[in-house]
Amino acid sequence: MKQVLVCWRDRKGQGTRAQAMWGSWGLRAVRARGWGPAGVRSAHRGTEPRRATAPEGKQSNRILLMTPWLFSDKGIIYFKYNNITFAYSDKMKNYRYAGMRLYSSSATVDPKEMKTFKALAYKWWDEQGAYAPLHSMNDLRVPFIRDNLLKMVTNHQLGSPLSGMKILDVGCGGGLLCEPLGRLGALVTGIDPLNENIKTAQQHKSFDPVLDKRIQYKACSLEDIVEETAETFDAVVASEVVEHVNDLETFIQCCCQVLKPGGSLFITTINKTQLSYALGIIFAEQIAGIVPKGTHTWEKFVSPEELESFLESNGLLVQTITGMLYNPFSGYWRWTENTSLNYAAHAIKSSAQVETEEHHTKVPGIDGQEASQK
């Protein structure tokens, strides 16, 4: 286990502080007259710790001054910084499990977002409820994924055009996109950091024996499975997900790592514009109630240009970026050349064996036709 002692000085010059970090868990050290984190009285309790000197109002340089580790016969580890003695006991390991986070410690997963979605975890399959726009979005995103994947193969089975293809649905929620992809013959893995979402998805797919064999779900973050699934999937889908992640660059890197060379990444998300703030948050959340309040954070929205930059810097060649428009009155989506609100992107992981098509086609591959507005 890695041990790091970090020492610094108060901005107001009120003495030094120290914090010992054991892995991802901090054990706060106290002054000489206090108790150590393991309940061991400081060996120098009558001595005031030496104060670092620095000009008033300025922060002194951070330094590491410590003695080698000392092990007692009771399993207690001691070390000393200046006049302060620190102690760590094996008993502290027990607190690790009591204080574990409720959600994944992933760099991309935001615990605040998870709290919002947890309250809606059992409403995924209510086609008239909070997720009604996502149910309707399947009319666009399923053919978008299907037709672009079929461009990469020469033969496919009628009725099961995606047969044999392995698809990863990141942030799958209740499985709204996994199930139609499974019906097209794909072997789908759906992951979501919220266990309640996975329970809902598992329960719903169990009603269909065919889907039960083609779809598997796992409660985890994308980073959790990168190593075990490196270059495993023919396609990765992140639909209405990237606007909720904390670290988009890391997220895109992970997507690239689990893709096979020549594999496809599909993203649908919201552009970061004044219009998306006015309609996507003010109108959709606060006025019309199309989606629950607090579902989106405008600062996390990403423009097509920024997304394209992340994709290409990770070896993904952008094929398509096209706009999507939702009609709240009819409840249906349609394709549009305007990307100022929602948009879809398709990129391919570069490979010497794969010759990509012309970049930035404006119309998605839905049998060469724009989806009709219902």
Image: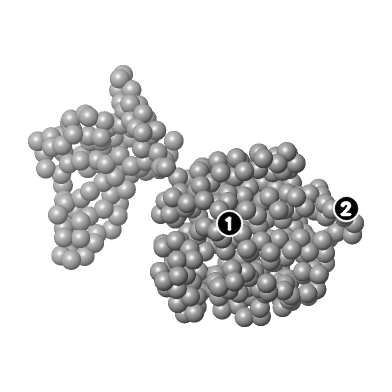
Return the x and y of residue 291 as percentages of the image width and height. 48, 63
Q: Residue at x 43, y 54 (%)?
A: 116
Q: Nearer the viewer, residue 38 or 137?
A: 137
Callout 2 secondary element: loop
Q: Position of residue 128 (x, y in %)?
A: 55, 59
Q: Earlier in the sequence, mark 1 or mark 2?
A: 1
Task: State the mark number for residue 319.
Answer: none
The residue indicated by pointer 1 is 127
Which quarter of the figure is the C terminus placed in?
bottom right
Q: Residue furthest top?
A: 73
Q: Which residue was labeled with disc 2? A: 157
- Identify which residue, 285 or 78, lies in the foreground: 285
Tell me if mark 2 has few (under 14), some (14-19) or many (20+) residues whose alpha carbon lies within 10 angstroms of its own.
few
Total marks placed: 2
Q: Is residue 297 above or below residue 277?
A: above
- In this rendering, the answer to whether 38 lies above or below 333 is above
- Residue at point 50% right, 43% down? 196
The picture quadrant where one finds residue 312 is: bottom right
Instruction: Mark 1 vs mark 2: give the one in front.
Output: 1
Q: CA distance from mark 1 to mark 2?
A: 30 Å
Res 289 quadrant in image: bottom left
Check the image and report above or below for 257 versus 320.
Answer: above
> Where the N terminus falls, by quadrant?
top left
Residue 218: x and y, percent? Answer: 59, 42
Q: Nearer the viewer, residue 277 or 231?
A: 277
The relative height of residue 108 versus residue 311 in the rendered view (above or below) is above
Please name whichever residue, 337 or 370, is drawn nearer the observer in this view of the structure: 370
In this picture, residue 80 sits left or right of residue 53: right
**For this view, does 290 lie left or right of residue 235?**
left
Looking at the picture, which amino acid does disc 2 mark?
Answer: Gln
